[in-house]
Image: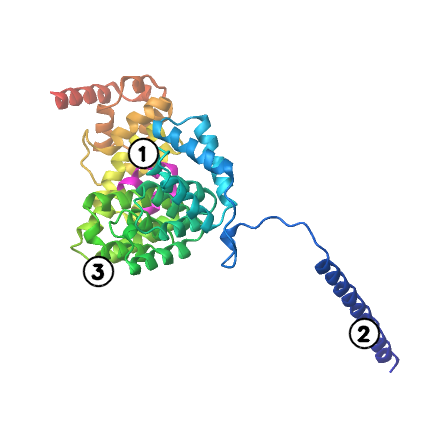
Amino acid sequence: MKPIIAIVLIAAAVGWFRYGRWLELQRDAATLNATSLPTRPVSGWNVRGGREAAEIPVTLERDLLRFLELDATGIRGVERDKLSTSLADEFLCLDHASICRLIARLEGDASVPAEMRAKVMDACIAALSEVNPEEAMRLVASHPDAELNALILGQTFARWAARRPAGALRWYDEMEKKGLPIVRDGKLLLYVVPEQARIDPAGALERALSHESMLTLENSRYLGQVVGRDQMFAVDEHRSFMVALEHVSKKHPSSGLLKSVREGYIRQLTGCLSEFPIEDAIMLIETGFRPDEKLAAAKEVGDSFLMGPKEEMDRWAGWIAKAEAPADSEHPLIRLINVWSFFDAEAAGRWIAKEPESPLKDACLAELPDKLWDTEALKHVSERQKSNGEGESGAARD
């Protein structure tokens, strides 16, 4: 019985303490509410309705005009770059209505040269997109008839999609339903599809197909290149895109658009294979490339090492040696050996020396650069092999 009484007393004490603490917090909250505290101005972009337009700083208008003046010269410099940064900060403090007033005022100011007036909207969108791309695109939507620079528009959308892809894609769908001019010509689509490919590759490809009339084959190839270069960085992302591409292509086997997307994508991915760990790169090739694409990749890997990393050349050589290609001077292994010997002749020589005798090894020996014969590893290769190689090489050249 005594333990039970003790537990009850302890619980009551704890409860009383917490009740007292709750009363203290309530008094503190009341004190804070009654006290006028200094507050940081809140950007009008986060306020929905019920607010008067903020006063436009004189410095903003001055900086914007100076930026447009410098931009008209086509020369980028320190002053222009500094103005670009300061404009972004200044726009962050303005609400939607204020920016609209600024645009209307400058576009209607006859004292401003016509060339500069025509670019006021573009400059405002570009500056705002640095700090709030979502609202920059909403500003675009509020000026549906404005003729905007396609590059600025696309970059703004891409910045928004990088932060909130689902929200950016919903906005684009809404603009399409409304039939706004900014989505009619397909220029923005070249940014929308690659951004969607990052989170929904199959949906991105279906979107492209549904707008096939807007996209030339060149545009389609460009879409694939952008996805391969700018959107996919992880191996899993590339793998997901290739699976989606294969799946959608089977549903639309005669689509020229999908064929062009694939050409652009595979070409771009092939060019950066040497940047991946070799296990990942070979996995992508073996599981996602078609036979002709695999051979093209084997041929290009050697060239990619000219500018890329030089690690694991021996493992790449082992994989390329298995390429389904004739064992002659055109075999992709020979190109890799030549590139390899330029950076590390000794390592290339050792690799060839330890390879078992085969027609491909003979073809490699026939095409070796002279400096490889001076390596320690190849000094042990018989003079007969060397002379035979030189004879075959000369015959091939004749």
Residue 264 image position (x, y, % from top left): 25, 43
Q: Main secondary structure of the magenta part?
A: helix
Q: Residue 278 in magenta?
A: yes
In this view, which residue lies farthest toward the bottom?
1
Residue 337 image position (x, y, % from top left): 29, 28
The mark found on residue 251 in the picture is 3
* Left or right of 51, for residue 337: left
Residue 59 image position (x, y, % from top left): 51, 35
Q: Earlier in the sequence, mark 3 or mark 1?
A: 1
Q: Residue 24 in magenta?
A: no
Q: Note whether residue 368 is visible.
A: yes
250 in relation to 305, above or below: below
Q: Nearer the viewer, mark 2 or mark 1?
A: 1
Q: Which residues are magenta?
A: 267-284
Q: CA distance from mark 2 to mark 1?
A: 78 Å
Q: Quadrant of the N terminus?
A: bottom right
Q: Note whether residue 74 is visible.
A: no
Label 1 neighbourhood size at 10 Å, few (<14), some (14-19), many (20+)?
few
Q: Amino acid at mark 3?
A: Lys
The mark found on residue 11 in the picture is 2
Q: CA distance from mark 3 to mark 1?
A: 49 Å
Residue at position x 41%, y 56% in the image: 167
The mark found on residue 115 in the picture is 1
Say whether marks 3 and 1 touch (CB < 8 Å): no
Q: Nearer the viewer, mark 3 or mark 2?
A: 2
1 in relation to 33, above or below: below
Determine the secondary structure under disc 1.
helix
Q: Earlier in the sequence, mark 3 or mark 2?
A: 2
Residue at position x 26%, y 53% in the image: 208
Q: CA distance from mark 3 to mark 2?
A: 68 Å
Q: Amino acid at mark 2?
A: Ala
Q: Amino acid at mark 1?
A: Glu
